[in-house]
Image (cartoon, rainbow, N blue to C red):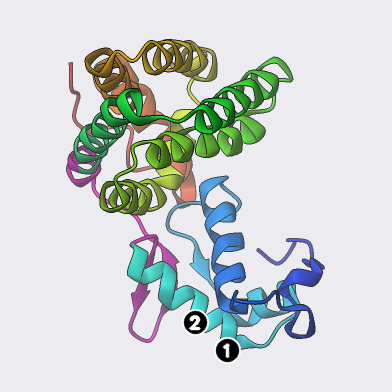
Amino acid sequence: MDTLPRRTDPDLRPHAARAGERQADRLRQALEDDIATGVFPIGTRLDEVKLAQRFGVSRTPIREALIELAAAGLVEQKPRRGAFVREIGISRLIEMFEVMADLEAMCGRLAARRITPDEVLLLEQSHAACKAAHDAGDPDGYYRANQIFHETIYKASHNGFLAEQALALHGRLAPYRRLQLRARNRVSTSLKEHDEIVAAILAGDAEAAGERMRQHILIQGERFNDFVANLSTQRPGGTGAASGPRVD
């Protein structure tokens, strides 16, 4: 982490705080992105002093951001050792992905019934952004566009509580969902699945939209084995996960 570039984003400086948004919230979002994109691999210690130097802020908002990340389940606070990017056991991860799949299926079903014309436009725009990132060979850009794609469907469900739960779990699984995109051809496959999801939603086919969303999230069979292999590269030393259980 010593070689990480210093962040100079003015939005992270106290004197440039945007109305209604805390500095710790912006730092948390920046750290979430770094965790999700592998800048901070699973198991990495997040040093408050180095992070403060990197972002050009005091340690107080860094500490607040880490507390919020711990509450979200992305970071683990260890007594007398500090904060670490949380490592979740394989069986627990599978459970979380199963719940995520059903939450997204519900969002897809409701979106197919309730989406508005304005939301259709947003869905098509986010889908186009995914395609552009895919065509450009930009997996990080695809990950970001993919986030917007899914959040658009959550909102189009017009069920605030469901959207909140889906968004919270989506955030907690962010680094692991990002890892899925590292499997060979996964971005191309994901984009094809998006095609089917969009088609079902626009056709108003609630059952098809729900099932397409559910299958899009589930990791099983070969996808699970690819996921576990990629997970091993995210751990210090690159070991520990490749021998995980198979789900065929």
Residue 135's image quarter? top right
Residue 47 seen anywhere in this rendered image of the structure: no
Q: Residues within 10 Å of mark 1 (few under 14, many from 20)?
A: few
Vertical order, 88 against 182 (above or below) = below
Residue 136's image quarter? top right
- Tell me, yes or no, whether the highlighted magenta stretch contains residue 94: yes
Residue 146 screen position, x and y as percent: 53, 32
Magenta part of the chain: 73-95
Q: CA distance from mark 1 to mark 2?
A: 6 Å
234 to the left or right of 227? right
Vertical order, 21 against 166 (above or below) = below
- For the residues bearing labels 1 and 2, Cβ distance under 8 angstroms: yes
Quadrant including the C terminus: top left
Amino acid on which the number 1 mark rests in the picture: Thr
Name the residue beneath numbered marker 2: 64
Quadrant including the N terminus: bottom right
Looking at this view, is 10 or 200 the one in front? 200
Number of marks in picture: 2
For label 1, the SS is helix
Q: Residue at x 46, y 41 (%)?
A: 151
Residue 8 seen anywhere in this rendered image of the structure: yes
Residue 114 screen position, x and y as percent: 34, 30
Residue 98 screen position, x and y as percent: 20, 35
Q: Residue at x 38, y 10 (%)?
A: 203
Looking at this view, is 116 or 237 the one in front? 116
Amino acid on which the number 2 mark rests in the picture: Glu
77 to the left or right of 41? left
Q: Residues within 10 Å of mark 2 (few under 14, many from 20)?
A: some
Residue 22's image quarter? bottom right
Name the residue beneath numbered marker 1: 60
Q: Residue at x 63, y 26 (%)?
A: 125
